[in-house]
């Protein structure tokens, strides 16, 4: 993508992202670390949950790969060198792309885009698809420029096979009238006509390019919501039915204060059950996961929540994961353990963090890379898990039957067999059924 050509776009819309977080959220002031030692249940190296999680990862996130080496006559080749190297995860390990940071020129912009492309295979555009960021450009006559910016970001991701999560088609809370074209508390009759027209416009722009949408974000919310104005939660079923009539892209619901704190857990479970009963079931369930020192849920407690929602038999996803603390070791440890318990659950299909660079993060302490681009312990932990612990890279030689057998993590792999002139390369996609690959070594037999 030519960033220079889009510089004007960045200038035109830069003011639109002053509200980088939804209503009710604010960056945590940076102050001295708390004197007391903060920790969480399940942190110890010998915590019982670890063994069970490792077994589930082995069962659900890996499958067998059998490489068979043969000569020109089909006879098994013993002792052939084999290497299996993963190229891409099937599981989503993602992060947000902030439009303003994405458009930066110079070293910061180059580093931001490079690090993102190297370390993440899934994304959410932090604020680009929010209703106000269509409404305000339209009022200022720059909506086409805003769409060009998003088009550029979409091209960047699709060219790198990075799945995009649309955030969002609708946002339930009504606490900031500027986020909507109308004060629906005063004019409830305008809610559905304006909302449905907006959803139609968003999906038409998407055109099937996105991997999924948050159909309803903060569906429980706080204070007045769309359901308050509409008179019932039927408005949410109506949103999903309407969107589903316009697109085949999976439609998710998303909510916070379920994993950290848990104040919306019961209500979230109830509304999902309501949607299922109304034949407007979402295609997936998202958990925001904005953690602080004060709400680090026990690892066993996270598993219990996951199990409750897994009963709906829908995919689960950690959609907005971050850990706001100045204790960098605590941060790295909790990131490791939340990722591990989530990756181990068979219903999960992705973990998406809510920011990676301190220079553009709604909670700077939660970043993986500091402002000067030095990596923090939590960033190193992310890399270690995603590209080492849960990454296939094994080598060996075929046995007497010409076979080399391993278990690899699901995703795309490159298999190299033989050496020198006889070397052959094959690419495969490993799913839960496993894969058997036969490679003929030229010049043999």
Image (spheres, rainbow, N blue to C red):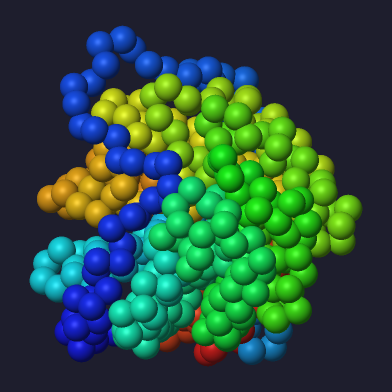
418 or 211: nearer the viewer: 211
Left or right of residue 431, residue 350 in this image: left
Residue 133 appears in which quarter of the rendering? bottom left
The residue positioned 77% from the left and 69% from the top of the image is 241
In front here: 23 or 180?
180
Q: Is residue 326 above or below residue 69?
A: above
Q: Quadrant of residue 345?
A: top right
Image height check: is 286 above or below 151?
Answer: above
Residue 338 visible in image: yes
| Residue in view at x 74 percent, y 51 percent | 231
Task: Give the camera-side residue of 52 and 313.
Answer: 313
Q: Quick check: 87 above or below 391?
A: below
How many numbered marks have been drawn onto this rendered protein structure? 0
Q: Residue furthest front?
A: 186
At x 70% / y 29%, what residue is drawn? 304
Of residues 153 and 279, which is closer to you in this image?
Answer: 279
Residue 120 sits above or below residue 204 on the image: above
Residue 415 seen by the camera: no
100 sits to left or right of 133: left
Q: Which image quadrant: the C terminus? A: bottom right
| Quarter of the figure with the N terminus | bottom left
Residue 160 image position (x, y, % from top left):
42, 77
Please tell me which residue is depicted at 41% across the width and 60% down the height of the picture.
178
Give how far across and how far down residue 426 sits, in percent. Answer: 55, 79
Spot occupied by residue 288 in the image (x, y as percentages of width and height): 53, 45
């Amino acid at each position: 993508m030519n960033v220079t050509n889009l510089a004007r776009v960045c200038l035109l819309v830069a003011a639109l992202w002053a509200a980088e977080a939804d209503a009710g959220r604010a960056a945590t002031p940076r102050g001295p670390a708390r004197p007391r030692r903060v920790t969480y249940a399940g942190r110890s190296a010998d915590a019982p949950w670890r063994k069970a999680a490792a077994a589930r990862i082995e069962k659900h996130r890996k499958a067998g790969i059998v490489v068979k080496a043969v000569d020109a006559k089909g006879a098994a080749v013993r002792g052939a060198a084999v290497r299996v190297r993963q190229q891409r995860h099937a599981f989503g390990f993602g992060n947000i792309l902030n439009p303003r940071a994405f458009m930066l020129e110079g070293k910061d912009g180059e580093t931001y885009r490079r690090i993102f492309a190297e370390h993440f295979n899934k994304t959410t555009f932090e604020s680009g698809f929010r209703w106000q960021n269509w409404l305000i450009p339209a009022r200022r006559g720059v909506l086409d420029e805003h769409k060009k910016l998003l088009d550029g970001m979409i091209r960047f991701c699709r060219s790198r096979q990075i799945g995009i999560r649309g955030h969002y088609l609708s946002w339930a809370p009504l606490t900031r009238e500027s986020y909507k074209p109308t004060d629906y508390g005063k004019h409830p009759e305008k809610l559905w006509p304006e909302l449905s027209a907006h959803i139609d416009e968003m999906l038409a722009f998407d055109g099937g390019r996105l991997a999924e949408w948050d159909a309803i974000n903060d569906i429980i919310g706080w204070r007045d919501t769309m359901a308050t104005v509409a008179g019932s939660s039927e408005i949410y079923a109506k949103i999903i039915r309407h969107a589903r009539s316009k697109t085949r892209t999976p439609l998710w619901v998303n909510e916070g204060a379920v994993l950290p704190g848990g104040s919306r857990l019961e209500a979230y479970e109830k509304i999902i059950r309501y949607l299922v009963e109304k034949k407007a079931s979402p295609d997936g369930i998202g958990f925001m996961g904005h953690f602080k020192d004060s709400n680090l849920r026990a690892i066993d407690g996270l598993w219990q929540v996951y199990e409750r929602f897994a009963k709906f038999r829908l995919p689960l996803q950690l959609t907005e994961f971050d850990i706001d603390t100045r204790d960098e070791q605590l941060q790295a440890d909790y990131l490791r353990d939340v990722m591990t318990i989530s990756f181990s659950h068979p219903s999960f299909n992705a973990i998406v963090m809510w920011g990676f660079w301190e220079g553009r993060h709604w909670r700077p302490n939660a970043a993986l890379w500091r402002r000067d681009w030095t990596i923090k312990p939590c960033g190193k932990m992310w890399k270690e898990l995603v590209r080492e612990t849960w990454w296939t890279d094994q080598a060996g030689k075929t046995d007497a039957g010409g076979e080399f057998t391993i278990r690899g993590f699901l995703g795309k792999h490159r298999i190299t067999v033989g050496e020198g002139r006889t070397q052959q390369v094959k690419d495969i996609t490993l799913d839960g059924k496993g894969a058997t690959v036969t490679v003929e070594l030229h010049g043999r037999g």
